[in-house]
Structure formats: C-alpha cells, structure tokens
Image: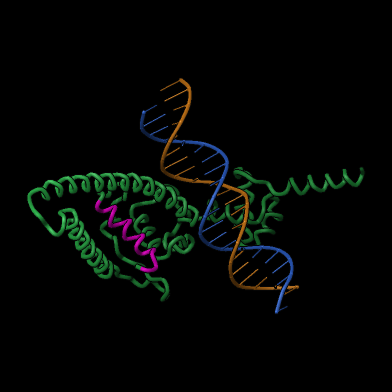
Chain colours: A green, B orange, C blue
Amino acid sequence: MVAMTMGLGVLNIQEQGWKKGPWTPEEDKLLSEYVNLHGEGRWSSVARCAGLNRSGKSCRLRWVNYLRPGLKRGQITPQEEGIIIELHALWGNKWSTIARYLPGRTDNEIKNFWRTHFKKKEKSSLKQQKRRSQILKDKFQKDQLQAQQENTHHTKTTTASEEKLNIHDHHHQSQDQTTTTHEHHDMAFSVNGSDHQCLPVMYQDLVSCSWYDATPDQEYVLWGGLWNLDDPHS
DNA sequence: AACGTTAACAACCGCCTGAGA
DNA sequence: GTCTCAGGCGGTTGTTAACGT
C-alpha cells in the first residue's frame, strides 16, 4: 500500500513535468533576460537556470519564433510572398532554408503562411476541377449529338468528336512542349553566395502583385508551374 | 445578436542528426 | 562502434480574431 502510494507520488511528479501552453509575459521576460545575458544555446540549462518550468525545446522555440531581436511582425509583404513561392518551388518544404532568405521571418511563420494559402488554393482548384469536368461533359454530349446529326448526311471514317479529340490531343502536346520550353527559358538563377544556394528569378511579374489578385490564367501558370517543378520527372 | 466558417498565429510532437561520453 | 542526449526541423494541432450569413 505504502509502495503503491509512493509509486503514485512519483507518477504525479512525472505527470506534472514541464509547463505547457501559452507563455506568460513573466516567462518571456525571464527567458529573454537570461538569453541576453548568457547567449543562445544549452536550452535545457537555460530552462533550469532561468527559473522556468519549461522544456529546453519549448524555450528555444519561444526564443526563435517570438522573442529573438530583429523579428518582423505583421503581414508577409508581396515581395516576401514572391521569394517564398520561388524558394518553395526550388526546395519544397525546407522552411528553415527558405527562412534564411527572409530576414526577420521565422520558419514557423513561413510554414504557417504557406499552409494557409495552399489550403485556400487546394479548395478553389477542386471547385475549378469540378467546373472543368462539367464543361467537358457538356461539350462531349454536344459533340456526340452533332456527330449523330452529321452521320445521317455523310459517311465519314472518323466522327466529329474523334477528330476533335485528335485536335485536342495535338493541341495538348504542342502546349506541353511550349510549357517545357518556357520553363527552360524563364528558369534563370542568380547565384547568392555559396554555390548550392541558387535563387530562381522566375515568376517575377506574377508574384510582384499579391496572388489574391492574380487572374485565373496567372494562377494556372503560377501553380501549375510550381507543381511541375515539384515533380522530379518533369 | 448569434452562430458558423475561415485565416492567422502560437505551441507542441515526433523524428532525425550530430556531438560527446 | 554504440549509446545517449540536445538541438533542429517539419508536421500537426489548438486557440483566437475576423468575417460572413
């Protein structure tokens, strides 16, 4: 019984553990005072020595994402948007790498920004897809009707819809080729310091304005282009 | 005014990596 | 060589404010 009680006591202490949840202004003050005095690093000892009941990880995160001097507050600017889009096209979800090119912005901030806007795009593109398939469906039915009517007057080896489909395929092929060529032409890089850190300067005119204002065509080029780049086979 | 939805932000979790014992 | 641990990173979740109906 005693042993059980003692065991529960230990359990309670373990369960209590580090404090979680939002940081209080007092905790922020303690942490920033300590880091300003002793510098960054050794986060687990920072937590202990600063008198914070927080894990080292939590302290580091709070400092890096919120307390560190020089952090920008407020909305991501259109210029920053452009950089994020370009670098994401290049590196994917390497948020910390992307954040290095945006002084005052944290990887967390960029990640949140991307997720918020990507979600928005995902939803709208789903709607667009539905609309497109409906249009294609209508067009197909119309073509079939037209073909039937034409068949009553002429005997053709190929139906009108088949011809149209062929034309459509040719159009697609040439369009794909054009896109590929454009990608090659537009994909210019400016070397920034170290040799592995090349910055693409594509999409400049598209991202110079906020993407909320982009026309559907611009959106298509922008997003289609990005996902093509993400595709290792393209 | 009340309610539901969405966007933005803050924080935690789990995994990976590198350094030191 | 391997084990442990701290730190870093990306993914995910929770909370809150703003907005629309």
Asked if the stretch drawn in magenta spans residue A68, the answer is no
Residue A92: quadrant of the picture: bottom left
**Most extreme residue toward the left, as rendered?**
A153
Quarter of the figure with the C terminus of chain A:
bottom left
Apparent side of residue A164 relative to residue A94 in the rendered image (left or right):
left
In the image, is residue C21 above or below residue A95? above
- Counting from the top left corner in percent of width and height, residue A96 is at 49, 61
Which residue is at a point 78% across and 45% down the rendered structure image?
A12
- Counting from the top left corner in percent of width and height, residue A140 is at 22, 48
Q: Please, what is the dominant secondary structure of the magenta stretch? A: helix
Residue A22: quadrant of the picture: top right
Which residue is at a point 46% across and 60% down the rendered structure image?
A93
- Counting from the top left corner in percent of width and height, residue A38 is at 64, 61
In the image, is residue A78 above or below residue A191? above
**Most extreme residue toward the right, as rendered?**
A2
Question: What segment is highlighted magenta in the picture?
Answer: A217-233
Front residue of B8/C3: it is C3
How many numbered marks appear?
0
Front residue of A156/A145: it is A156
Asked if the stretch drawn in magenta spans residue A226, the answer is yes
Apparent side of residue A71 relative to residue A228 in the rendered image (left or right):
right
Quarter of the figure with the N terminus of chain A:
top right
Which residue is at a point 17% across and 45% down the rendered structure image?
A145
Which residue is at a point 74% across and 46% down the rendered structure image?
A15
- Counting from the top left corner in percent of width and height, residue A159 is at 16, 55
